[in-house]
Image: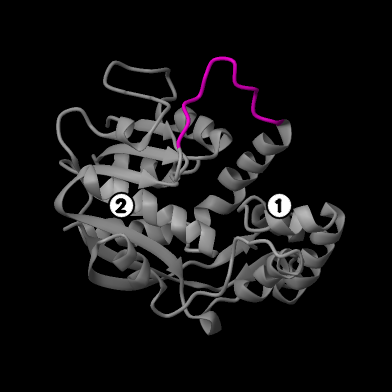
Amino acid sequence: MSPTLVRHQLPHSGSMRCDDPPVPARSRARTRDWAEIQERMLVPLYEAAYDRLGIGPGTRLLGLGCGSGLALLLAAARGAQVSGVDADESRLELARERLTPDGMPEHTRLVSGGLEDAAPGDAPFNVVTAFHPVGCVSTVEGLTASLTAAAGLSERGSAVVLGGWGPVERCATVGVLRVAQGPADSSGGCAGWRPSGRDDLEELAERAGLRPDGSGRVACPFGYADLASAVRGLLSTGLFDAALEAAEQRQVEKELAEALHPHQRADGTVWMPNVFRYLIARTR
């Protein structure tokens, strides 16, 4: 395993300096909530894509929006060489802890800077993943730029995995996520989430100059120990950030808890069946 983790934000990227301010405590708490509560909900999506592509020794994988690194960790456990880029420094710090728990061995490169710094030194990437579901227009534009840049660092014909929500009628969490839409829409901002269109992933691939080469659907239920955990987990996704800017946190949490109430079972747990979709595309 040779993990490389890069802080990266498109369309412009900036390197992290020694005098950069520390990650705020609230950001660290949200990162822990993501890693401990929410991130595991997408493991079936990661595993399905890895199984389909035969991820293992010989795979040189770049994870766009790698977050706190769980998807990279699963690929590395299969023998892949992994690199990751993310704009959230708090999540990236946790990814470093996960992938290099005993410090920084000689075969591990951790760099901060542009996407080109994530490229393996010996060979180009042959798999690129973008598992975070497609959201609002600004997210799509940034992801298009990232995918275009990643394709330039990959072998011709390399697999690119795009993730997204499945049909609205098969995603119980959609009704809860509408809480994120309301306040942000009224303020004229981007909610960070919108219902998925049938061809969203194909359109994104086309914008990035990629060639679609198959797709699949995966059950990814969201399950929580209790209502409080569900609220914390969903807030950690970042999909409610615009709502939190437009309204007080207490109000957003109250509306979120009300939206979750129909999904709370007699034993207090919260369970929401969902279907996610992935598209396999190829670099040209």
Seen from the viewer's position, the closer of residues 164 and 105 is 164
Calculate the distance from the C-alpha at mark 1 to the C-alpha at mark 2: 34 Å
Q: Nearer the viewer, residue 209 or 168?
A: 209
Residue tagged by mark 2? 148
Compare marks 1 and 2 and give the one earlier in the sequence.
Answer: 2
**Residue 108 sits in which quadrant?**
top left
Q: Disc 1 residue type?
A: Arg
Residues packed near mark 2 inside 10 Å, few (<14), some (14 to 19) or many (20 plus) = some
Q: Write down the residue under mark 1.
A: 232
Query: Residue 113 at what x, y percent from top left?
Result: 41, 29
Residue 129 to residue 87: above or below: below
State whether the magenta stretch is mostly helix, strand or loop. Answer: loop
Rate crowding at label 1 as few (under 14), some (14 to 19) or many (20 or more) other CA atoms within 10 Å.
some
Q: Quadrant of the N terminus?
A: top left
CB under 8 Å between discs 1 and 2: no
In the image, what residue occupies the spot 20% across and 27% down? 121
> Residue 104's x, y, as percent?
38, 18
Percent position (x, y) of residue 178? 68, 72
